[in-house]
Amino acid sequence: MKHLTPQIIAEVTDGKYIGDDALRHERVMGAVRDNRDVVGGNLFICIRGARVDGHDFANSAFDAGAACCLAEREIPDAKGPYVLVDSTLESLKTLGAYYRSLFDIPIIGITGSVGKTTSKEMIAAVLGAKLNVLKTTKNLNNEIGVPLTLLSLEERHEVAVIEMGISDFGEMGRLAQMVVPDIFVITKIGFSHLDNLKDLDGVLRAKTETFAYMKPNSIAILNGDDDLLWNYDPGIKKITYGTNPRNDYVTESQLLTPNVSPQLLTPNSSLLIPNSYGSHLTAAVLLAAVIGDIFGLTEDDIRRGLRLYEPVDGRAKLINTGYITIIDDCYNANPDSVKAALESLSTLSGRRIAILGDMLGLGEHTEQAHQNIGRFAAQSSIESLICCGEHAKHIYEGFLSERTVKTALYVPSKNELMPMLPGIVERNDVILIKASNGMRFDEIVKTLHILQDRN
């Protein structure tokens, strides 16, 4: 890690150092907001939450080895030094931007309405075949997570892949001021966070705030299958990728299943990739190959990196329990990602069941969007649909409106649904679990994981 001390933190954040003068110049390494994550030398960020105040855990952080705390109120009987600031949240962002400025390695920022986490993991895997990569972990993609990620940069890192997630106007600009990406990727402009962004033009406007903070020699990599992105001028070099032949980088196949591996076509080569699951992976694999090509990786390097890719829990992760196959895709959901998940499910063999929950953050589009998903599900090649949640009732209504012979069930809550699953699920079923993260459908995944044959 670059040199960072409590004294430097105080100077950068315009804060006041409180503590033993002998510790003022001790080295600080990394930053965390949860005292349970503290390792020796960390900066602990005291953040006031809706239910928990991080200041109450400052001394626990010191006990775990924290070198310093960043606080916005005094810490009684503090066991170590801390920097007192007006706002820990604003000071964290200031500190993240300062620390990022100490590095001249290439930084890749990535956003999009769907596929950004999968793409981030895929890009990091490919680049990791040759380079030492820092990547966003867990869900640290917001105005707290991004500076924490930047503060984990170390001198050994040769490139960073930073996921940037937003839900309102202005957020991307604030993230971009910290990250200042050299390459910025947008995977798709889709129907997400419409309660704040209103429509697709609003989503585009919010996602593209980054370009105002990028250097003239930076690169925009955009999914050219998305008409809004195809027509968008970022004001810097633009590279497009996708299945449409008009793109700079093109893949032949639109779908990846456990039995189908498409070829990736780049301006210089063709790449065979390993088997993976999900239609969304086609774009992610191509994107990773594009960035690998930009960084000068060979075909063998890219193939080796792709083999290192591991799906993240909740993002189209395929789980074979020996009894059933679970597609754990419950981390997030919007109309675009749910349709892609249903398309992917339709390619698998076995009795295909989709358990769909509420898609949150759609504002005035909520009812219509859920009904549309129901109609889409009825027309897809699945055998059965289970709808669970307040808004999911509209999915059920849309499904029934198609007058399909397929079966459908509506259950208002998880607590009602989970005890019913043993009587519904059969051996060799393939079950998709998809809902917004706030629905906590990971509990359904856990319930399904332990089911066994009843015979």
Image (spheres, rainbow, N blue to C red):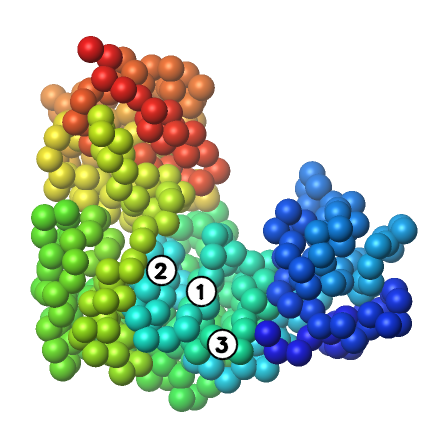
Badge 1 element? strand
Residue at which label 2 appears: 121
Name the amino acid, label 1: Lys
Q: Residues within 10 Å of mark 1 (few under 14, many from 20)?
A: many
Disc 2 to disc 3: CB gap under 8 Å: no
**Residue at 54% from the left image edge and 81% from the top image edge:** 103
Total numbered labels: 3
Q: CA distance from mark 1 to mark 3?
A: 13 Å
Q: Residues within 10 Å of mark 2 (few under 14, many from 20)?
A: many
Q: Position of residue 371 (x, y in %)?
A: 29, 34
Residue 135 marker: 1
Residue 34 marker: none
- Quadrant of res 239: bottom left
Q: Viewer-proximal residue, 405 or 445?
A: 445
Look at the image and tell me whether residue 397 can be seen.
no
Relative side of 76 to 436, left or right: right
Residue at which label 3 appears: 156
Residue at far top of view:
455
Q: Position of residue 345 (x, y in %)?
A: 19, 39
Relative side of 263 to 361, left or right: left
Name the amino acid, label 3: Arg
Q: Viewer-proximal residue, 389 or 13?
A: 13
Q: CA distance from mark 1 to mark 2?
A: 8 Å
Mark before the other along the chain sequence, 1 or 2: 2
**Residue at 59% from the left image edge and 74% from the top image edge:** 1
**Residue at 19% from the left image edge and 44% from the top image edge:** 344
Disc 1 to disc 2: CB gap under 8 Å: yes
Q: Position of residue 348 (x, y in %)?
A: 13, 39
